[in-house]
Image (cartoon, rainbow, N blue to C red):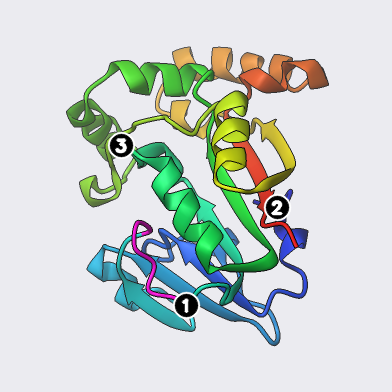
Amino acid sequence: MEISRGRLRGARRVLDLGAGTGTIDSLDWRAPDRRVIGIDPDPRIDGHPFLDDRVRGSGFNLPFRDESLDAVVSVNVMEHIKKPESILGEVHRVLKKGGVFLVKTPNRRHYVARFANLTPTWFHNWYNGLRGRSSEDTFETIYRFNRFEEIDTLAAEAGFEVLSLDAFEGIPEYLLLSTFLFYPGLWFERWVNSKPSRNKWRANLEAVLRKPE
C-alpha cells in the first residue's frame, strides 16, 4: 500500500479491516498522534503488534459509531467477500465526511487470480503450505470486487468517490518454488510494467475511495 499510504496523513483514527496477525512489517499503519484499531474474526488478532486497539469481529457489522473514523484500510481482504457491497456500506457509515477507504486486492484479470478462481481451496492450502504459509491464513477466493469496473460501480453505489484506482505488479514471489515457472513470471512482470496501458493485467489493484464532504 505504499502508493496510497500518504492518503493517511492527518488521519487520527484508522481502522485496519481484516487486520490479521500482524506478521508483515509493511502493514504497520501507526504514526504520531494516530490510533490504529484492528478488527478480525481470527482470535490471533489479540497478539497483533501494530495495533492500539484489537476487536474480534466482522466488517459486516462494525462496532463503531457513525462518522467516527478518519480512514479505513483493507489489504487482501475484499477478494474473500461474497457481498462486498455490505462491507462498503458499513465502511461508508463509520467514516467521517472526507474520510478515505484504502483497498488493496488482487486483480481478477491477472493469471494468478484466474488460476486461483479455477482451483479449489484445498489446492491453495497445499500450494501455500509449500511456501511456508499456514492453512489458517488461506481463505476461499470469491473475486467480486476485483476488476476496475466492479470497484467503480460498487463504490459509486455505496456513495463513495473514487479518488484513484490503479494496478501494480511486483516480482512473482509466488512462483519462486519453480525456476520453470519463475522466469516466465518475471518476463510477464517486465512486460506488464513496460507500458501504463497494460495496468489492467497487473497483479494487484489499489483503490482510494472517499466519503464526500
Q: Residue at x 22, y 45 (%)?
A: 135
* In-front residue for pair 158/174: 158
Q: Name the residue furthest bottom.
A: 33
**Any part of residue 189 in sight:** no
Left or right of 9: which side holds 54?
left
Q: Residue at x 65, y 30 (%)?
A: 169
The label number, if any, that marks residue 147 in the structure image: none
Task: Please name the amino acid that badge 1 sits on.
Answer: Arg
**Region in magenta:** 59-64
Task: Please name the amino acid that badge 2 sits on.
Answer: Glu
Task: Please name the amino acid that badge 3 sits on.
Answer: Asn
Residue at label 2?
2
Residue at label 3?
128
Instruction: Name the front one of labels 2 and 3.
Output: 2
Looking at the picture, does residue 24 appear above or below residue 56? above
Q: Quadrant of the C terminus?
A: bottom right
Left or right of 117: which side holds 183?
right
Q: Say whether residue 93 is magenta.
A: no
Q: Picture coordinates of residue 210 (x, y %)?
A: 69, 54
Looking at the picture, does residue 76 appear above or below residue 197? below
The crowding category of the residue bearing disc 3, from other C-alpha atoms within 10 Å (few below 14, some 14 to 19, many at least 20), is: some
**Any part of residue 71 in sight:** yes
Residue at label 1?
65
| Quarter of the view holding residue 73 | bottom right
